[in-house]
Image (spheres, helix red, strand yellow):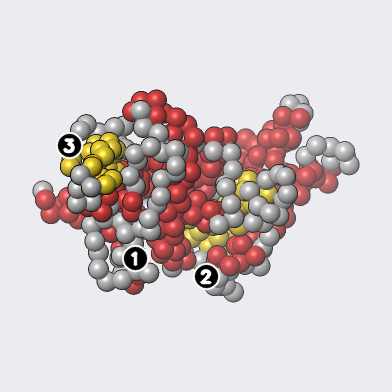
């Protein structure tokens, strides 16, 4: 439970080392409780940024007898952030971290112990991601997408259950992943609640009929272009599909011009009305004409139907200057998850899913905001377990970055 006091260390439940983790004293990750009254301390070099001190512990085993054990005292900040960042930012699975630590330091630290550290951090970060969700919902624009992830579950005996990480973000803002066991509409419906801004997504039907009554649904031009591009790949001589792809590329060039000239939202809106609107009218006319002339087995009626079905949402570009041409930023935020799937393979349990989602949310938000994730976690984690819940919004990456910028400005 979060209270009003803020200690300098992480008051976590005891994390017991596995039996084969010889002389690795983890007790509560608190140095003063770890050593005990009969221990002496010798300071050593850092071991791979993970451990900070080597300790000698003297235990009384009987009258007049003492037994010395050598072990390592964990630096609280390093022990919390090192395996988390290595796994979810550098895509290094825990068994490789364990093997590397033993190879390079001689220390045996099992994958189970590392997993306990990682899951504890994920649980601590969940309140912050809830505050990040509120940041998104209080704004006027969200991009959404989803990606599959395997999870060990009793629902799928003998194989992995396919769950999903649903990604919600704002360009230049927070990225929040929501773990769901399925791909049904219930996921975005629960996350978005009564959201009243702009939701940009692909044409997946689960995004229909979600949000509040005032929510505006926009579509993604990159998805429309991709379908026509696939038609060109199937038939390189299809000049109609190729011409539509070229026109869609011109829309991207106009957006690039707006970014390079650092146009204000008002000026970008004027540029779109001047240059993008004629292109949109031409694209629609070419698609409609070509669809009416297409043979039943032609390879591109499917992209034509997709684009025309979503045409009202695609035209939102001309109404809302804040709207991006595509959902590419949302897709980019999910690439680390795809890389992770190749390395850490799957999520270990249904309970671990929300914790993993919280960690990925923090790491991707820090990446998008250009915040050093190790610095952020090292600053936030030690005080998080006892931080007042009504002030948790002060610890989101965006709030942390704003506070750091203010402090740097004051220092200069």
Pointers 1 and 3 in contact (C-beta within 8 Å): no
**SS type, badge 3:** strand
Residue 163 vertical placement versus 226 (above, below): below
**SS type, badge 1:** helix
Q: Is residue 55 left or right of residue 275?
A: left
Q: Residue at x 45, y 30 (%)?
A: 99
Crowd around label 1: few <14 · some 14–19 · many ≥20 (10 Å): some
What quarter of the picture does the N terminus occupy? bottom left
Q: Nearer the viewer, residue 99 or 91?
A: 99
User: Where residue 86 sits in the image (x, y, percent)?
Assistant: 41, 38
Q: Is residue 181 left or right of residue 101?
A: right
Q: Is residue 209 visible?
A: yes
Q: Which residue is mark 1?
A: 392
Q: Residue at x 41, y 45 (%)?
A: 17
User: Where residue 354 sits in the image (x, y, percent)?
Assistant: 52, 56
Q: Earlier in the sequence, mark 2 or mark 1?
A: 2
Q: Which residue is mark 3?
A: 42
Q: Which residue is mark 2?
A: 196
**SS type, badge 2:** loop
User: Where residue 210 sits in the image (x, y, percent)?
Assistant: 62, 67
Residue 209 vertical placement versus 113 (above, below): below
């Amino acid at each position: 439970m979060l209270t009003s006091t803020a200690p300098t260390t992480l008051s976590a439940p005891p994390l017991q080392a596995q039996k084969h983790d010889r002389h690795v004293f983890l007790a509560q990750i608190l140095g003063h409780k770890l050593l005990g009254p009969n221990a002496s301390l010798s300071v050593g070099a850092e071991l791979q940024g993970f451990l900070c001190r080597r300790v000698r512990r003297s235990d009384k085993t009987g009258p007049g007898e003492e037994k010395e054990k050598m072990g390592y005292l964990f630096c609280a900040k390093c022990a919390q952030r090192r395996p988390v960042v290595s796994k979810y930012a550098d895509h290094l699975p825990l068994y490789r971290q364990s093997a590397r630590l033993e190879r390079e330091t001689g220390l045996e630290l099992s994958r189970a112990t590392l997993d306990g550290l990682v899951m504890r951090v994920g649980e601590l970060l969940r309140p912050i991601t809830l505050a990040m969700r509120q940041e998104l919902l209080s704004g006027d624009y969200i991009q959404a997408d989803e990606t599959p992830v395997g999870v060990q579950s009793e629902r799928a005996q003998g194989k992995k259950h396919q769950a999903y990480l649903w990604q919600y973000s704002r360009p230049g803002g927070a990225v929040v992943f929501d773990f769901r066991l399925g791909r049904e509409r219930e996921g975005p419906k629960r996350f978005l609640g009564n959201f009243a801004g702009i939701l940009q997504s692909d044409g997946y039907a689960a995004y229909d009929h979600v949000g509040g009554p005032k929510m505006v649904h926009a579509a993604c031009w990159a998805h429309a272009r991709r379908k026509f591009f696939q038609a060109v790949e199937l038939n390189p001589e299809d000049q109609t599909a190729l011409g539509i792809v070229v026109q869609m590329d011109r829309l991207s060039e106009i957006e690039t011009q707006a970014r390079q000239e650092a146009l204000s939202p008002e000026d970008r809106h004027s540029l779109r009305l001047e240059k993008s609107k004629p292109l949109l009218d031409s694209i629609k006319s070419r698609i409609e004409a070509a669809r009416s002339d297409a043979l039943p087995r032609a390879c591109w009626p499917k992209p034509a139907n997709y684009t025309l079905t979503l045409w009202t949402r695609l035209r939102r570009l001309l109404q809302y200057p804040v709207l991006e041409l595509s959902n590419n930023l949302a897709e980019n935020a999910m690439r680390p998850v795809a890389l992770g799937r190749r390395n850490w393979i799957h999520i270990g349990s249904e309970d671990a899913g929300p914790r993993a989602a919280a960690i990925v949310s923090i790491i991707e938000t820090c990446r998008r905001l250009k915040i050093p994730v190790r610095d952020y976690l090292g600053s936030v984690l030690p005080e998080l377990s006892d931080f007042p819940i009504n002030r948790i919004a002060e610890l989101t990456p965006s709030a942390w970055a704003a506070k750091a910028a203010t402090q740097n400005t004051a220092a200069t």
